[in-house]
């Protein structure tokens, strides 16, 4: 297989197929739904012989799939996602020596503006960019400043004190370039928060290729080391590494559990949309980085 001929982190040219998968030519926008429950279904995964980074081949027209994506189930989880967004922002607070009100925050891949909304409620001057038209319109209708497009579509002189890249870097074909674009937009003391699944976490190792983060939309699989290497390649330096937890409705958890347990074994009363619980499986990484002096 030679669809991708170099490692996206170290540039190494020797890659070995470690997991076969779906051919990139058979894809449609539905494959990129944020709530896609088909765990374990991926494109072919290749590991770099030099640094161990795992990635899938490039996908023709990838950005177009995200622009055309429609995923109503994502919005159903808005209250839980907003609590998660507050959680992410809370992790940043101890590193800030100025009140939130004076800080400019950018959420890259802002979806329907959930984190932007949470950040504005906390007093940040927050805005976002989002390539998916459907999600961006939801944000716009809610009066949230989320621009349609990518970070490259922002005005050239736009700078931020905080940039959040939450569950984005595993979706792009040029992760180091994306980190560089973020670094270029940071103010001198600015902070970049990168969140991504950790493919060497205990949950990932226990579940093997059935781990919930193995999915078609994820074309990069980072761990602490490869994420640190990617940040370093973009002249960024980690200042803190955390394991953020998430919040889910019982209904969402039960539906996801069906991928691992026969449905008849999950009691119906557990499928509740009203009850949500915090869950930290420690299989996500949150690295806060600054620009190298
Ligand atoms: Zn490599």
Image (spheres, grey):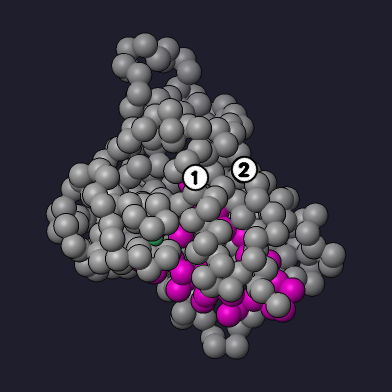
For marks 1 and 2, give the CA distance.
9 Å
x then y, percent, for residue 228: 56, 59
Q: Secondary structure at mark 1?
A: loop
Q: Dividing the picture into quarters, in which one does residue 14 lie? A: bottom left
- Residue under label 2: 243
Please state which of residues 257 and 281 is positioned toward the viewer in this rendering.
281
- Residue under label 1: 198
* Identity of the residue drawn at 54% across and 86% down: 155
Numbered label attached to residue 64: none
| Magenta-highlighted residues | 169-198
x then y, percent, for residue 212: 39, 37
Quadrant in which the N terminus appears: bottom left
Please state which of residues 215 and 15 is positioned toward the viewer in this rendering.
15
Q: Are marks 1 and 2 in contact (CB under 8 Å)?
A: yes
Figure check: 134 above or below 293: above
Quadrant in which the C terminus appears: bottom right
* Identity of the residue drawn at 20% across and 63% down: 3
Is residue 153 among the parts visible in the rendering? Answer: yes
């Amino acid at each position: 297989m030679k669809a991708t001929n170099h490692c996206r982190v170290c540039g190494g040219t020797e890659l070995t197929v470690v997991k076969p998968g779906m051919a990139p030519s058979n894809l449609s926008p539905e494959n990129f739904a944020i709530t896609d429950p088909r765990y374990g279904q991926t494109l072919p995964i290749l590991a770099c012989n030099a640094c161990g980074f795992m990635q899938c081949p490039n996908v023709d027209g990838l950005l177009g799939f995200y622009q055309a994506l429609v995923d109503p189930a994502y919005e159903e989880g808005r209250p839980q996602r907003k609590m998660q967004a507050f959680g992410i922002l809370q992790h940043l607070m101890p590193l800030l020596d100025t009140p939130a009100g004076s800080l400019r925050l950018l959420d890259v891949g802002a979806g329907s503006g959930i984190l932007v909304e949470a950040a504005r409620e906390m007093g940040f001057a927050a805005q976002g960019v989002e390539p998916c038209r459907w999600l961006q319109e939801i944000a716009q209708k809610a009066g949230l400043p989320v621009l349609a497009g990518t970070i490259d579509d922002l005005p050239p002189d736009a700078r931020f004190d905080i940039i959040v890249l939450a569950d984005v870097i595993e979706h792009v074909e040029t992760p180091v370039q994306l980190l560089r674009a973020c670094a270029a937009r940071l103010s001198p003391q600015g902070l970049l928060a990168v969140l991504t699944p950790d493919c060497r976490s205990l949950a990932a190792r226990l579940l093997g290729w059935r781990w919930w983060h193995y999915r078609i939309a994820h074309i990069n699989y980072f761990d602490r080391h490869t994420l640190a290497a990617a940040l370093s390649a973009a002249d960024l330096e980690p200042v803190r590494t955390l394991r953020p937890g998430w919040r889910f409705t019982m209904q969402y958890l039960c539906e996801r559990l069906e991928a691992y347990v026969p449905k008849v074994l999950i009691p119906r009363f557990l499928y509740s949309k009203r009850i949500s619980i915090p869950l930290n499986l420690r299989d996500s990484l949150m690295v806060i980085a600054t620009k190298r002096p």
